Image: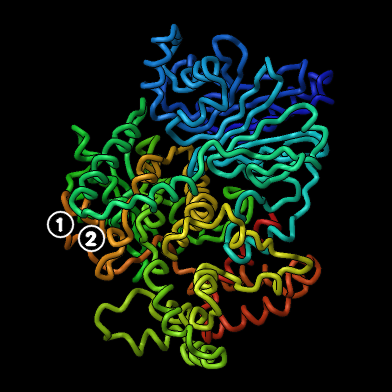
Amino acid sequence: MCGISGFFDPALMSDAALNERTLDDMRDRLAHRGPDDSGTWSDASSGVGLAHTRLSILDLSAAGHQPMESHSSRFCVTFNGEIYNYRALNAELQSLGFTPRGSSDTEVFLAAFDQWGVEATLPRLSGMFALAVWDRKERVLYLARDRMGEKPLFFGWLGKSFVFASELKALRAHPGWNPSVNSDALALFMRYAYVPAPFSIYQDIYKLPPGCFLSVSASDCQNPSSFSAVPDATAGVFAPRRYWSLKSIANAGTSQPLSDPEESIVRLETTLSEAISDQMVADVPLGAFLSGGVDSSTVVALMQKLSSQPVKTFTIGFDVPGFDEAEFARRVAEHLGTNHTELYVTGEQALNVIPTLPHIYDEPHADASQIPSILVSQLAREHVTVAMSGDGGDELFCGYNRYMFSKRIWKLVERLPGPIRRSIGSALGALSPTTWERVLKHVPGRPPRVGYKLHRLADAVQSESLVDVYKRLISYWPQPERLVTSSVEPTAFFGDENRLAPPATFVDQMCFWDQIAYLPDDNLAKMDRASMSVGLESRAPLLDHNVVSLAWQLDNGLKIQNGASKWILRQVLYRHVPRELIERPKMGFSVPVGEWLRGPLKEWSGDLLNRDSLVRQGFFDADLVQETWNRHISGRRDEQNALWAVLMFQAWHNS
């Protein structure tokens, strides 16, 4: 795993000293992503500069140094990620006359570019990656990102300089950096707690969507107004283009679903095992995160089956009831015989992470599980350089409660007039979360944080449609335009044809939306920044494109069955781990933010939410923020999500 950055500016062709200084500065901002090696490369005749910081995983020798030129010298690349099928590609290329100098995957796919070209090679690559490659012959800069968005890639214009990087902090080192907050993107952030691609928090800076590439010529550099961030846009603009389409995969899968349970279980275990085997290849120590939940336990169980040595596993525990899964992880580890390391952290240790969040995440990010993600990454990095995760299991196999309950909620209220829905919502919200906890204390099987979840339900029952149920369940601020001044929230997300799943079920639609937005822009971004902040590579074998394709073939009855989510993934797991070690209510991977805001974070939060400061900044309706803060502090409502989003923006902006 590495950090990449660079620029394309024909106007700078003659200023070699400025190019070199700028590249060095951009590269150095990403040293945490690649502590083992670094380099820069420039083409003075074109105004192109590439920079790289290296975390050595495959071929630890100098033969893996980047930026790297292809054997023909036509292509030069700066690359972040891993290509898991590079050995098969290498064998095919050697049969065509290629002779590798080293054993890195970078050299192999550069040879593939020489042989087949960039656009034809991208669909052949199996892995996680973000790359920038300069084509000397065509004088075109290509950017590309992996299918599911595991690796980040920002790009855009600073004046007429086209720039790109793994993280925004590298762009800040460019002499043309003069940022302004995109208020429309800020409205999106306040709804979702992340900024969805193709937007970034800044004007004129974008995220390359997953499964896309972008080709940039000298004329494109000088004419940013001709750019469209919408993939495959036409009408005289240049835009990202898809080399792989999740919608096509979903369409193909749902049109020919697999429904036989036994056949499907066997196929899933086989496909998962193949993906995990490919991803266990590394020239450095490798381990896995283990929460004791279905996803990570399945990955670890199959890793241990494939390994001749005990797999190194890592988990953290919290000294807060309802937020601690360490005991469950320990039981799974003991059963599988892994070499398990756990660390119990205090609330104070977790709180100490908060001041580092703006620097680590680089743009506002308000998924509070970022805190334990950083802590478990720090723990793992003390022992390994690569760690497997269970990311993607919920989105692929219907693990979130909304997949099971959205339609049930809508069926209960769809025939009721709006005033009655609102009355039901008001009644559910009349009791504070702590009161609900006391009332339901002795109810068997009640979920963790039941009071908070009933308040979420209170919002959902007031919905106007099934889509509205989903939107309310995922929204931190259901009406962000009321909060963010001078903003117009982009509405294309739920109406764009490319963001609509094939006409199957609404569960399919929710999974599709989550896979194209929530997964890459929240979960994967969270894990990338957390792990790379300490120079740790995180791999997600559940997101292998063959696993994704198979998941879309599986009938929903194999994913949700008898009230159980991820049914088929559980069946694979139960072949290796006893059911009783896994069956329990879903907890998630988070921290008690709501309680902290009323306790140890109260003063910090109060300072950031100071009304006079909010008015001076001009981003938010200060009165609305204050009303929300007061409701939370009084205990009448649990507003932790809404407040955390504002606080994460404020902390980021102030930094």
Dot 1 lies on which element?
loop
> Which is nearer the eye, 295 or 593?
295
Q: Residues within 10 Å of mark 2 (few under 14, many from 20)?
A: many
**Residue 578 disc label:** 1
Q: Quadrant of residue 319?
A: bottom left
* Residue 462 versus residue 547 in the image, above or below: below
Residue 149 as seen in the image, left or right of residue 132: left
Characterize the local packing of mark 1: few (<14), some (14-19) or many (20 or more) Cα atoms within 10 angstroms. few
Cβ atoms at labels 2 and 1 below 8 Å apart: yes
The amino acid marked with disc number 1 is Pro
Q: Is residue 464 left or right of residue 101?
A: right
Query: Measured along the vertical axis of the image, is residue 300 above or below residue 613?
Result: above
Seen from the viewer's position, the closer of residues 15 and 85 is 85
Instruction: Identify the residue position indicated by label 2 in the image.
Output: 582
Q: How is the image coloured?
A: rainbow
Outermost residue, front side: 255
Front-lying residue, 366 or 261: 261
Q: Determine if residue 600 is in view.
A: no
Q: Quadrant of residue 206?
A: top right
Name the residue located 75 percent from the left edge and 35 percent from the top edge. Answer: 174
Residue 415 in view in this figure: yes
Measured as percent of width and height from the top left, residue 252 is found at 41, 47
Q: Position of residue 626 (x, y in %)?
A: 67, 79
Which residue is located at x 74 percent, y 74 percent?
621
Q: Which mark is residue 237?
A: none
Q: Quadrant of the C terminus?
A: bottom right
Nearer to the camera, 358 or 93: 93
Amino acid of disc 2: Ile
In this picture, is 527 found above or below 471? Answer: above
